[in-house]
Image (cartoon, grey):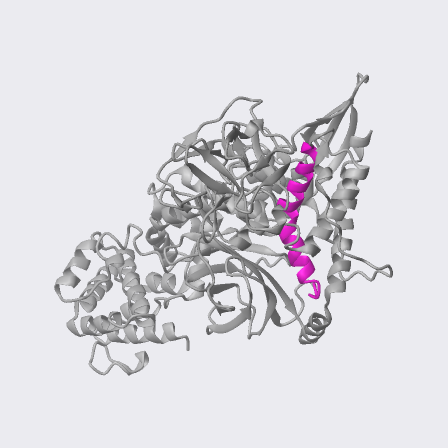
Amino acid sequence: MNPYQSLNNQLKNDLISPSENTTLSISSTSSSLSVDTQNLINSLPYYQESISQEVLKSSLINIFKNKLPNNSVSPQPSDNGFGYNTSYDYTGGYNGYKDAFFNAISLTPIATNVLTQVGNIVNENFWNGYAVALLTDAIRKQVSVGLDSNSLQNALNSYSIQISKILAPSYLGIFTNGYTPTQNALSAIKNKDLALNELDNAIANGQFTANVNQALSIPGDSASAATWFLFNLWISLKALGMQDVDSAIIKYKKNGLNIPIQIDSNNWWNGEYSNWFAPLDGSYIDSPMITASMPEESYTYFSGSWYPSKSSENVQNGYSQSLTNWGSLSYYKPQSSSCFGKDTCVLMSDLSIKRISEIKIGDSVYTKEGTKKVILVESPLRTYRELYKINNLEIYATYAHPFKSENKVLAINPWILKDTITTFGDLGVDYLKVGSLLEGKDFKVEVKEITTILSGTKDEKVYDLILEDATKGNFGYFVGNDDTFIEVFSESSNPMKYPFVSTSIINAMNAIKDTCCIKNAKLENILPRIVFKSKNPNFNTLCKLATIPDIDFFIKEGFWDEDSSYLEHNMISLLSKNLRRHIEGGWKIIKDNEGDVLCIGINDIELIGKNVEERNISFLLKPQDEELIKFSFKSNLKYAPKIDDVLYLNINSKPTSIYVYFMDLKTHINLQNIHNKYSDYFLYDSKNNIVGSINLDFRYLSQEDVEVEQKQKKEYCKDDKIKLAVALGEDIYNFVSELLKKNKK
């Protein structure tokens, strides 16, 4: 029996028959309570019992599906190049996003009851906004899309706090109509006033008080089970018609009952008790439209032609792309690359200062590794982005530019930094904020003030410097003025870190640049559609790692080639993480969930402001209604551990959900929508704040397949990784070149 279930039964027995002998089974005790009241008490779920949790979550998800705004579905943005302009029309039959993703889904009776209990505690904007955030997270888990994960996790954090305010009313909704044991027990009560009076008196009984106080005094499972039991008693009182449960709680306290503060009067109903509820995420949102193609019609006007060339197209994952990046609900669309505002001052090699907008290729700057030449000056448009001024110095940074601190890399938005330049995540990323200590030229600089500079002019540019030998050391250049200069990194990935990934990307980049017109190519709309098909390729020819392109790849007519950098940036930010996972996991067998062995792929972890101290990383796993499972894997990275291993579980029945515990963090995953994909799940701390993510994949295999897979893992070698990397690079090129054919006309 589950330990929480055992503790719950003990507390039920204490309430029904409050004698000193608390070891009797419930059925063997005598009680002054009516059978109806006893049945209600016996129907109460134990702590972390899965069915009541799933009924509550299902009802909330049903509400969110119905509350998704039905804004019009947007086609992909128009694009243009030399001699042509293309616009798009959506030609599907859905009136809007709600109609598309959740067509014909209506409120269930349970969800309707929950809404009735919640009333106006939260407004319509809460339901609408949370629905968009959850669907966006669901899309992120199933298809590749470019997102501002910092904004998304901030939104999910905020909505998680807000939803705590309605947890008690929502739970009351399923307690009375939805969770079958309590619903049936309540329906069977012939005299609710009598049952209410009996339950009230039973809770106030002195012997029950002593037994509950003892359970509450024991930290851990006992206290958690007792707190949950009392919370369910308060819900029972309200379900039976008690108008003022808070006054009853005060009475019980006067009688000696020790009530935890989170379920004390007022607190229990107003959201202070919420750690029993695992935060909602996109794994609970299911819709076939997430991976569905979207019909469009394109109209391309060529120079010298009066009439457009028309064509029809089904855009892969189009509805998801539309919601997250093209339409009016794209709240979490990613921003452009990180740089510095034009007036940022850079420390030159002769210790003079120069505005970053005035620096040219060949200039020399000061670094802690000595004088270094500038080999590239990147200068994209600011595109109305906010800039951040540090300590009133001449430093104007975009929100994801990397600053060097003693142990980590800091940015105003570290999530975007780790998502777009993945190798920075390995160095450890954290928030740049007031109080942060930055590496300076002669001394550490404490951040005392951060001032936001609002959007600039349409044609204003921002800048970044690429230095010689930047991939050979952990150094940057210095920005500031007077006697205070702060070390910053170039916003550039280190291709030597993951040579197999670099091979895929470099081979694809070279082929695309040689054969395709990439100017105005909207790669951020194209690359997320790629589905990697290559698996264990059997090349007869010798494959080798790609040669890293020299700086000439990014220079055109003596200046920065924006199109080539744009190609590289999108390749790295949108593809590199999944490329690494595919290549490192090239030994895995992918099947359509056939078999009885649950295979949990634990691929990598990314943390914000935290680190892993041990080489052996320990995990706790708790499938629904199963015992805790302990296991560990090795990793040599403390900030972004790469694990790339699989845990094989033989379990009695397929669980619908699972908890994963790592350090003091946790995530709760709905397994009803397994889709054979590497998916990121947010990691929550004890206060349900998101502090990182873990990438997992779930499959079911037969025991025979497991044995084959383990054999393949042992035999998987460097040459296999190179072959797969080359094949995946070809996949990328073939997909992109096919979609860019019209650009060559």
Residue 223 point in image, percent of width and height: 29, 69
The quadrant in which the C terminus is found is top right
Quadrant location of residue 122?
Answer: top left
Residue placed most toward the observer, 373 or 67? 373
Q: Is residue 325 left or right of residue 555?
A: left
Residue 231 point in image, percent of width and height: 29, 61
User: Furthest residue to the right?
Assistant: 540
* Span colored in magenta: 561-590
Q: Is residue 143 visible?
A: no
Q: In this view, does 659 lie to the left or right of 530?
A: left
Q: In this view, does 161 lie above or below 710?
A: above
User: Furthest residue to the left?
Assistant: 254
User: Furthest residue to the front?
Assistant: 350
Residue at figure coordinates x 51%, y 73% from the top left = 631
Residue 22 point in image, percent of width and height: 25, 80
Residue placed most toward the observer, 590 or 176? 590
Q: Is residue 180 visible?
A: yes
Magenta span main SS: helix
Residue placed most toward the observer, 82 or 85? 82
Q: Is residue 602 above or below residue 483?
A: below
Quadrant location of residue 253?
Answer: bottom left
Q: Does the magenta stretch include residue 658?
A: no
Residue at figure coordinates x 74%, y 34% from the top left = 518
The quadrant in which the N terminus is found is bottom left
Residue placed most toward the observer, 83 or 172? 83
